[in-house]
Structures are given as structure tokens and as C-alpha cells.
Image (spheres, coloured by chain):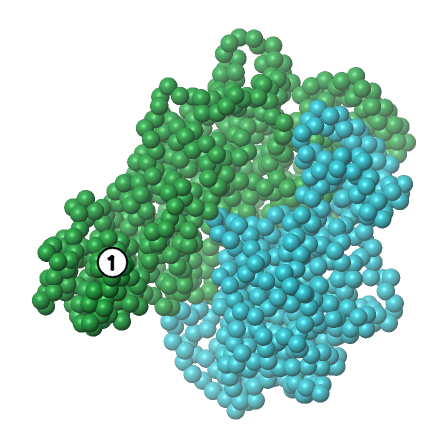
Amino acid sequence: MRILALAAAAVSVHGAVDVLSALKRDCFGCHGEGQVLSKLDLRSREAMLKGGARGPAIVPGNAEASLLLAAIEGRNGLQMPPGAKSSAELVAAVREWINGGAVWTAWKEDYKPEDLWAFRQPKPRDKAKTVDSFLGASAAKADKRTLIRRVTIDLSGLPPTQKEIDEFVKDNSKDAWTRLVDRLLASPRYGERWARHWLDVVRYADTNGYSNDFERPNAWRYRDYVIRAFNEDKPYNRFILEQVAGDELFPGNPEALIATGFLRAGPWEHTGMSVEAVTRQMFLDDVTHATAATFLGLTLGCAKCHDHKFDPLPTKDYYRMQAVFATTEFARPKLPFLPTENASDLAYGKSLLQKVSDDVKTKMERMAPGYQQGRGKLPPDQFEEYKLYQKHNALHKESLDRYEPKAFAVSSGPRNGETDGGANMRYPKRAEYKPADVHVLPGGNIQAPAEKVAPGVLSLLERYGGYPSPAVPETVEGRRAVLANWIANEKNPLTARVMANRIWQYHFGKGLAADANNFGKMGAKPSNPELLDWLASELVERGWSVKAVHRKILNSQAYQAARSEGRRLEAEVLRDSILFVAGELSEERGGPGVFPDINEDVARQPLHRMGSLSPVYRPDALKRMRNRRTIYTFQQRSLVDPLVEVFNGASMDLSCDRRDAATVPTQAFTLFNSQFAHDMALAMGARVSNVSELFVRVLGRAPRADELRSATGTYRKLLAQHTAAVPAPRAAARPVVHSITSELTGEQHKFTHPESPAAYEHNLHPSEVTPKARALGDIALALINSNEFVYVY
Amino acid sequence: MFINTRKTALLRPRLGMVRRRDVLFGGGMGLGAVAFSAMTSAKGPHHKARAKNCIFLLMEGGPSHIDTFDPKPKLDALHMTKFQKERTKFEANMNTGERYYVKSPFTFKRAGKLGVEMNSLFENFAECADDVCFYRGLRAESVNHPTALYHLNTGNQFGGDPAVGSWVTYGLGSENKNLPSFVVLPDTAFPQGGAANWSNGFLPAEFQGTPLRAAGAPVLDMAPPAGVTAERQRAVMDLMGALNKRHQQQHPEHAELAARIASYELAFRMQAEMPKVLEIEKESKATLEMYGIGGSNKDTDAVGRRCLLARRMVEAGVRFVQVIVMGWDSHDYIEKAHSARMRAIDKPIAALLKDLKQRGLLDDTLVVWSGEFGRSPDNGIRAGGQAWGRDHNATAMSTWLAGGGVKRGAIVGATDETGLQGVEAVHPIKDFHVTLLHLLGLDDAKLRYLHAGREKQLSQVGGEIIREILA
């Protein structure tokens, strides 16, 4: 068997895939394709088992007894291919493959070149090019009003003020545009806007999901880390290194430790009712899939049960990459707050939650002094209430940790006393810890492990892109470091392309490659591959600066061209913009998640938490907290703000690479009828003195004559109605009473949820303002519902 | 909102509406995207459907097959026999340690010509036995509530995939564009895992299940805050309309604008139609009594209302209705807890079947009753004494189906003598899903949606039809 030196060098030692391609190259000619010498066909596992004139070619699990190995090694009077000596690497690979069960991960060689574009190296960059040089003539430039609204919403997620618009429109200097872009990129609002895109992809949430949906009390530090990374223009390669292996690569660096929260971003839960091995496997599958989708645009999850049907991703590669994470354990280490983090509300927040928590404990103590395990000792009717307190107590205990200087992070191997995963996870002591073996799991079945695999990276980039696969150590530490460096590398043909494409997509609404998480065969082919490659190389050459790529794009004629179709504001932009134009937006930045006003029916909806009911949702008492930007709102997997949900917010369970913008009638209900919309409209009505001011506030422009006429007409009509009708005073808050069905008896028990310990700072109520303000508020409602406000061009 | 009788008259019948929109917005462009269930996405059935609609009665918590529809006399002999179950890495904590077989605390009666044994508490449902196909071979995979619920509801133990109802409405479209085509009638509390149990997942948003909460507005924000008059709303709407009209003239190529304008009108029509479906008080006294609603029917009122609503929804053209009844997780006190649950459902589910039948709807409606898993023949007697219950069991459970396309009066499949495992006609959840789709005229292998590089389907990887339960 003759292996060219070059090919041998490219063969990674553990790849069955490479064994098969070597066989194909060197053996099939005589044993299968065209001729079947010695009656031996080597083209399938079955044919190998059947064997030829001398008997079976392989004995799975026993390489030394296999004729195939003997022939390659030149033993037993065999020598194949005739007259050639096989490399030691190939012999080792074949031995390992047979001993591993000779799993046939068929490497289909029928991939079409156009389906492999993303795995190949791009052509060298032409520095002289610009974005526009790759595109045909752009449409005429959009007018300046349209442009400033477009770029301001694009980069900051908020509309421009009338003052900003007027200044820009009047500014005829040559660099007016670039100065505008610079100002927007320098604003902290930029990070708040663009971090949201990243959080969509990684499925950020503040809770674990599933039955208890416990809080991840320190996850907010990861959210703020992402915001800081965008604002500081952290080089994208560094951003990757920190998220995949910050703990290993930058020990002692707090930012890098916080960044590893990425690896735990998916939903996860372990309880007494789940199987530990299953829960662990769910994490491993999740992190493997998420890492590949986020940074490489690969649908690696498809290779979990079988070789990828469309892309060169064998199952074995899936489990080799999974083995990289086999030593990754959850950690919640102490980590003092950084000067860049907002700790100003921690004491306040903690005092409130502590009070709620203490009250619950007091009630439990009163019901059953010194009693811990209520089951069976209390009469069933009292027991349900007790059990509810137990549940709330457990939830509060986790939530209180959000105020503590700890990180939502991972470690390689368990950290003694600092592991994180709930009471039901059993962690070995560090000294006794041994990395778990990782096996190929055919069909994804953990109870039927096949061949054991060593950690490694995906082989397709070496194969098609000539990007060498590094060796990954089998030690406890250092696995992720190798993977991270392999991803965050300018020679990795996927990494920069995937990110450059994401950036383009968020600017234009559609990526150059339309499926941002899928650069494989089934993903849409790039509409302009040369431009994508050029942008990717710009990203790399400019020191992986995301802001540099923004500038390249924003300064192009393509970006500044008039657009015939607009984009509907995303849910967060819509909510933030309404708060902003109402003068109610609180621009405090960072810190634990805040609780906004949400639909009252949803807030009051009883929600099952394993064995009992959730505490009731309470918006933050202080406006300055609950009216913060949506990115700072608490992201609870089991309770999503319906305003965000109905306007196509991102799933917290599936990676969202592009927001849906479907129009459904329930959006009309939300924007036209919700208490939030009415409260904000009224706040606006009370802040302005006439209809024109409302246009300026909401739409950034004065009304045209006909608009002013119809708006004023409506206003007068409404003013008359409001003058005639005196609004009822604010209704008293209704207590939240839930009934719990006892698991023990099936009986219903009523439970009144405790009130919040903080006095709610009310939004303005119609009874507190003049008829004029109420009528203007109605006009404001029409404006925030208008298409002009909701779409950006 | 949007209350305007003049408009109501104009908007009906529906065909008239389309014409009116065409006039207003030019050819109805983009309108497909705004209906609650867009006809553009629906491909219609793949083959002749046996049922047009589905009512899925989800018993959350894992009802005990042993104590409902699959009695195990063998457990009387084994009662309180102790054994030790080792903790392996594939067992949950809950199921390990010192275990005891426990008998059923209930009595059983034979029902129907079929003679199926069922808990004596099913006094009313027993009368339906000959219309029902009892299936004892279904096998779940997870013994954990949220993952098992996601599995039964979406085909995937991870949350985030589309629910069965989403797939069905995606495949078949809606019969009534003014109503959501997939409605969920939850218990007072949302189940574990919450709204992900009726998520549209990666399917377009209009296929999401719409939960009708037990309290508050049936659809969120369908009505404005208290004190806002219809007159005021009309004025605001009209002003918005004028602004939008002008804006649209400036952006003539932006088709989505028409869709968004139309969405306000669709919302209006929904607001008009939804309350009518919900007016169960309009039903006759006899019907209300049959479902166990009102009067002295304290135990059955809540489930009765949901079952009656389910029938009304199906009548109004809602494609898929899921009724959730919680509280079946009886680790302890199974006698009390399961008794209460069975009493709560007996009259309502029997009424639902009888009512559908007498209205000729049962032939077109598939009714399914299932929990996310069954329960174990043994437990760990955590409470001591006789307050025993049963733990979770993914390898055996009882379900039943009735109506369009399923056998009437049949028992399919069997579990072993203690009820630990299914042994006959055993099928995984994916086969159950494939079968439900099949009955509704859909082929799981063809009902696909491209997401993240894969043509996804409800069964995930394909499955087979459970032929034994087909009529």
C-alpha cells in the first residue's frame, strides 16, 4: 500500500476516515473497482468481513488476526500493495481502526466542489478592492434623513433624535457620514445593540430551563462581558479564545473566565428524576453543537447519530470534538466584581430578595419548627403550602447568588468545593478525577457505546482547506485551548467567513450566505463569494476588528443606497425605541437582569416548577430599573415577555441566526392594546404641548400639512371626549391567588402570593393628568403603531 | 379593540373580505403572511385523511397505567415485597435503592362489549369503551417530566422543536382564518417546561399554539386597558390608517406594509369571533350537565369546561386542540390523588366522546388521551405506612385513541404481568406521532421543513405507522 508522503502527513492518526480514503486510493483498484483479485472486495465493511480467497480481511476488534493489517505490514507472506512499504502512520491507523471495531464511517467522495466552498482557503486578498467593487452599480443614495435613521437604529438600536437628524441633514462637510458612524460606534449603545445579535446565536438566558428553571445567578456577567467586548472592539479571535478556553489560556484573567459562560449557555437541568449520564451527555451534545454552529457555521449536531448526510462530517469527528469537552465541568468560582461591571444596585437588589426569602423561611419555620423534609409529617392540606415555600426557598437561594462575586463559568476537571450543577450532581474530588472516556455513540445511544475516540478537531478543514489538524492532548487541561486556537486562527477557512457574514447580515437583513449558521451544502450559497472572502480577510487583516468591518460596509454605496423594502424593528429595538421616544428609557448599563412591566395576565399566570408553583412575576418597583434596555431584562426560559415573544424574539433554546419578522395579528393587539403601549403613550402625552411635538418625538420630523390637519382633527375630537369623561382612579392592586393541585391528594389549595417588599413606583395614570395630556397620549399611540415608526428603510 | 359594527358587516362573509382588501391594498399582496395560519404555507393532506381535527387530552405528570386502564392482579400477591435496585449510571436517583412492589388500591370493572378492564371510578367513560382503542404498547424514553413532555409534545426531548399541533397546522392549514388553528387549553398552571410545549419551534410563527389562559383575556391584549372606549379606539385607528396610507404611497414596493395594515383588521375579526367560541354558557343545560359543568359539579367543572371548549373549537374549525390536565404525578397517596384526577376527567371525557359522536363529529375528529410516561409497579415508600404511590416508568404506559380512523372497541398491545414493560405491539413515541399524522392525512416523511441544514420532521428520523390501532 503506497501512501504518498504528503498524504501521510495529512493523515491524522485517529481518523478512520483517512484509513478508508487510503484504502480507496491504494487498494480498490485491484480489490473492488473493475477487478476483484483474489475474490477480495474491500469497498464495504460487509465485503471485508466476507473476505476473499484467503478468508475475511478483517476481524473487528482484533487487528493482529486481521489479514488486512498483515498485508499492509508485510506479515504472513503477504505484502500489499505489491512492492511498496506502508508508512508506520498508516499501519498504526489501520490497527487502531480495526481494534476500534472497524466502524465504517464511509467518506462519501461525491461531494460537489461547490458544496465545499467554505472549507477551502480563500484567494489572497486584493487590498485595492472595496465593498462596492464587488457589486454592480448601487441604487441611488438614500436621502439623509433615511440614512441617519437607518444607521442609528442599525448601530445603536434606538432611533435618532430630531436634533441629531437636523444636524446631520445640515452638515454638508465631506466627512459628515464617517463622523456619524464614528460617533455611533463609540457610543456604549452600540455594544448593547450588537451584543444582542451575539446572544441570539448563543441562546443567552438567565435561567436553566426545564422543570425547575433555576436561575443561573451570575450569567449576567457573561451578558455584560459580550457588551463590553463589542464596545471595546475586542479582536474577534481573542473573543473566541476567551469564550472557548478563557480559563485555560488566560488563567487569572477575570474577563476570560466570565467569557466561558458561553459553553454553558444552553438549557440544562439535573434533578433526582433525571439520569446523570443522560444529563451529562445532553450537555456534551449541546456544547459540541453550539461551538460548531456559533464559530464555524456547521451543523455538526447532524453527525451525532450517523455521518453527516450532506457535509464531510463523520460521526467520529463529532465525538472527537466532543471529547475536547469531556473534561469541561461547571464551575461557580469566586470572582470579585470588575471596575467595568455595574455593581451599584447589588446591595439594593439583595436587600429586597433577602427580605422575600426571609419571609418564606419564617413561614416555613412557623408551620414546622426545625422541620426540613415536610413530606408525610404535615397534613396534606398544609403540606402543599409548605412544599411551595420549600420550592420558593430553593429558587431564592439560587437567585440570591446573583448579587455575589461569582462567575458563571467552567473549569477543566472539577474544582473542589466550587462546582456548580445542583445538589443531584456528584462530582469526584479533584485528586480522584479521571477524564471520562468518549465513545462513538451510534444513533446517539449512550447505552451502546462503540469505538473509543481521542479528542480532536474536525478533519474536513485539513482535508479540503489544507489547514492542519493539531493534536489535542488527552490530559485534563489543555484540550479546549487547542480547539480554541484551531478555531481562532486566520488559516481556519470558516471562522472569519462566518463572522464577516454575520456582520453583513445584521447590516442588510440578509447575509451574503443566507444561512448564517450553516456554511455546509444545505446552507444557501453565498450570493457574492468574492465579497464574502474579501470581507473575511479584511476582518483578519485589520486585527480581527469588528468595527473595522462595520466601517468598510457602512462607508459603501451599497449600504447607503435607497431601499425599496424596509425592515421591521426587532422586538428589543421596538420596546427600547418606545421607551426612548416616551422619555422613559433608563440608560443605566450592566448588572443583574431587571424585571420590566409585562402583560399582567402573563405575570399572574401560575407556572409549574417541579412539584410546586413558581413565585409570581413582579416587575421592578423602580422605573429606572424596569425601564432599562431590553438586553438587560431578566431572560427566563419559562416566562418570556410576551411583547418580545410576539414580535419574533429569539428562542432561548435554539440558536437564532436571523430574526423572523412575520407579521401576525397578535402583534397588533400588543402594540395597540397593551398596558405598556398605553402607559408609554400617556407619558408622551404628558410631556408635550401639542401634536407637532409628538411627531418630532416619535418620528423625528414635523408633521406635513395634511398630517397635521388630520392629527389635529382627531386630537380635538378626543379632547372633547376626554374632557367629558373623568377617568376612574387607579385600581388597587389585586392580590395574586393561585390554586395548587396537590400531587398527594389531587385536592386544590388556594395560595396568596406575598406582595413585593418594595413600593411600586407607578407609571402615570390617566386620572393623574389633564384631558389634554390624555388626548395627546392617544395621538402618540397612533404614532407608535404607525408603519413609519415600526419600519426602518 | 377595533369595535365597529359597520365594519363587521362589511367584513363578512370572508370572501367579501378578500375582495375588499384587494380593493384597498392592491391584489392582496403579502397577505399570506398575516393570517393566523397562512394558507400559503399549508400544503394540504398527503393522502385521504381519516380525521380532520385532533383533540389531544394531555395528562401531565404521568398517569399510572396500572391504576387506570391496565390492571395488574399479580401485584396483589407481590404487595410490599421488598427488593433492592442498584443505582447504575442509567437510573435516576428516584428509581433506585430499597424498593417495594405495591398493589393497586383500586377496584376494576369490565366495560363495554369489549370487556376492557378499567378503574371503577370511570363510571361514565366506561360507557364509551366500545368507541375507544386502548393502546398498551407505547414506550417513552425519558423518566424526567420536562424532557418526557417535550418528547411527547414535540418529538424531541430538548425543548425548542415544533409541537405536534404546529406540524399538523403547518401541514393542513386552518379551516377558520379568524381563529388560531392550534389552541392549547392549559390547566390553571402552565406545565413544566412552560410554553415550549406548544412552541412553533423553527416553523413560522403563525403555527405556534395559542394558550387560552384560565384567567384573564383569552388572547393577550385582545382588549384595551379598562376605561378605553371603542370610540377612542376608532379615532386612533383611523388616524393611524391615514398615516399608514400616506407612508405606503412613499414605499410602493414594500409589500409587507399591506400585510401589517391588514393584520390590524385580522386582529379585529379575531376579536369578534373568539368570544363567540368561548361562550359556553350558550350551551343547553343538559350539555353543561353532561360535561359536568356548573351546579353541583365541583370536581369536574374545570376539565368539563376545557373539554366542551375543545368541542366548540373543533366545530369552529380549529385544527388541533390540546387539553391539559395536570396532577398525575402520584409518588405518594396514589389512592387519593389518582382518585381525584379520575373523578375530574371521567364525566368530561365521556361527554366529549358522546357529544362528538351525537353531532357526527367523531368520525372526523381524532381524540387522543396520553400522559408523558406510565408509572412503576414499585416504589421507595418514602412516606412510610400505606401512603404509597408509584414512580416514573418510561417503558410502559396506557394511552387511548378514539374517532377518525382508529379501531372502535379494541385493546392493542400489552404490558408484562407487573406492568413494568410493554411486551406486545411496543412502539416508540415517534411511531405514535407518525400514526397521528397519518390519520390526519399527513405523511411524516413528506411533512418536512428545512432548518439549520436539515429537512426536519416530527419523528426526527422517521418512524412507522402503528397499524394495529388503525380501523
Image: B17 above or below B48: above
At 51% from the left and 37% from the top, the residue drawn is A196
Mark 1 sits on what residue? A28
- Give chain A's shade: green
Image: B238 above or below B131: above
Q: Nearer the viewer, residue A441 or A7?
A: A7
Q: Is residue A219 left or right of residue A750?
A: left
Kindly identify which chain the residue marked by label 1 belongs to: A
Q: Is residue B409 left or right of residue A355?
A: right
Quarter-of-image position of residue A391: bottom right
- Give chain B's shade: cyan
Quarter-of-image position of residue A765: top right
Quarter-of-image position of residue A221: top left
At 48% from the left and 34% from the top, the residue drawn is A527
View extreme (top): residue: A173
Which quadrant is home to the C terminus of chain B? bottom right
Number of residues whose C-alpha sits closer than 10 Å to that of mark 1, classed few (under 14), some (14–19) or many (20 or more): some
Which quadrant is home to the N terminus of chain B? top right
At 55% from the left and 28% from the top, the residue drawn is A154
Q: Is residue A402 visible?
A: no
